[in-house]
Structures are given as C-alpha cells and as structure tokens.
Amino acid sequence: MKHVAIAVALASTSLVLVGCSSHSTSGEPTDTATSTAAKPSVAVSVKPAPNQPRNSRSPVQFDPCVEIDDGTVTKAGFDPKTRERIDQVHDDYAFIGCIFERKQEVRGQTLGVGSLIISSTNLTLDEFRKREGNAASETKVNGREAITYRKQAEEACYVVTTGPDGTFDMSVSSMGALTDWNACDHSQEIAAIVESALPAK
C-alpha cells in the first residue's frame, strides 16, 4: 500500500570520507586520526533525490532514503525491502524521504497493512504548528521538540520533530480493514526509534 505524504523536495549530498595519518618524531607514520564514517546498511538502493530549486531556504541535505538504515526500519516494525523514494519538490520548500510497508499475514497471504513515511524538510516546526493549528499537540521525541497530529480520514498519525534540515516528518498509517494493528497507538514509539538514527542534535 502506497500513501502519498505532504509536499516534499530534496537535494542529495555527497559524503567524502577522509583518512588522515600523522607522523611520529622518528618519521614513522602512525594511525592516530582516521575518519571512516560508516555508511548505513541499506539493502535496497533507491534513485537519487531530485534537485531542489534555489530560493531563500537552505536545501534539504539529509536524505532518509540512504541515511536511515535497515535495522532501524525493522525495529520500527516495517519491511526495509519495501524502501521506496517519495519526494516532492516545490518552489519554496522541500520534503525528501522514503516510504516503507508493514507486512502481516492476512487470511493466508502476506499483505501490506500499514506504512511509514519519513522525510527531512526545510520547513520549521513553527510553520507546521501554524499549518496544523489546534490539531497539533506539543510533545517530545528523545528530547527533541516536536508536535503530533492525526488525520482521521487516512488512518494516519504524524510526528514532526526538529531535524537536520529544519524538521523531520514521520507519518504512520494502518488499514483497519486488514489488521487490528493501529498505527496511531504506536506513532510515538516508532518516532523515537527513527529519531535515534538521526544526526545528533
């Protein structure tokens, strides 16, 4: 099952790994400073994020599709093999992200019964607050300032935290016709798991 989330845009970043060595007074090299940032383990590759237009906002640089590892997705209860890019780029803001399915046995068949969409965006948390109005409730996710809100018609709940580019948007949905697993009962727990994979505040 594929859901389309709020408008999103993105920019890809290149990661440069730099190895450094220093020399002792004897002239022999010593490995005292080696930077080898480990790449996240991601089994399913996705196409690069789309280009973002130049505007007054800094482009989205953190790409959840390549930076959130399979282990985090599995721990959150979703299938990392269903990793699929879901970006939308607008003139004045962007959401860069991925969608994952939750799989479950239903009447002898393995079906998608829910989804997780994670996006990095260059919108601010105050902009989300203004947009959602009274529907938004203040919360915290692993110490990060956040809001949560619900969209009843979509059987979906949203958690938006401060993030690497401005905010990090997470939506969790479920299909009540196929499962008794209710996404909104687990949205805060899932958000905490995903947040743990974000760069340090």
Image: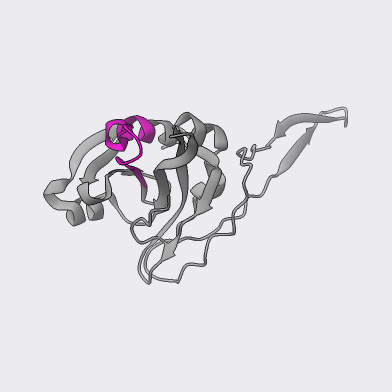
- Above or below, 125 against 92 in this view is above
105 sits left or right of 92 in the view: right
Q: Position of residue 68 (x, y in %)?
A: 52, 41
92 sits left or right of 35 in the view: left
Q: Say which residue appears at 50% left-offset and 38% top-offset.
A: 110
Q: Say which residue appears at 30% left-offset and 34% top-offset.
A: 182
- For the question of whether residue 167 can be seen, the reply is yes
Q: Say which residue appears at 41% left-offset and 43% top-offset.
A: 116
Q: Quadrant of residue 150?
A: top left
Which residue ends up furthest to the right in the rendered image? 27
Viewer-nearest residue: 83 or 102: 102
Q: Position of residue 29 (x, y in %)?
A: 84, 32
Figure quadrant of the C terminus: top left
Which residue ends up furthest to the front in the rendered image? 107
Viewer-nearest residue: 61 or 71: 71
Q: Quadrant of residue 191?
A: top left
40 sits left or right of 32 in the view: left
- Above or below, 57 against 14 in this view is below
Q: Say which residue appears at 35% left-offset and 68% top-offset.
A: 92
- For the question of whether residue 199 can be seen, the reply is no
Q: Position of residue 8 (x, y in %)?
A: 39, 60
Q: In this figure, what is the number of numbered marks?
A: 0
Q: Which residues are magenta?
A: 169-191
Which residue ends up furthest to the left in the rendered image? 134
Q: Is residue 189 magenta?
A: yes
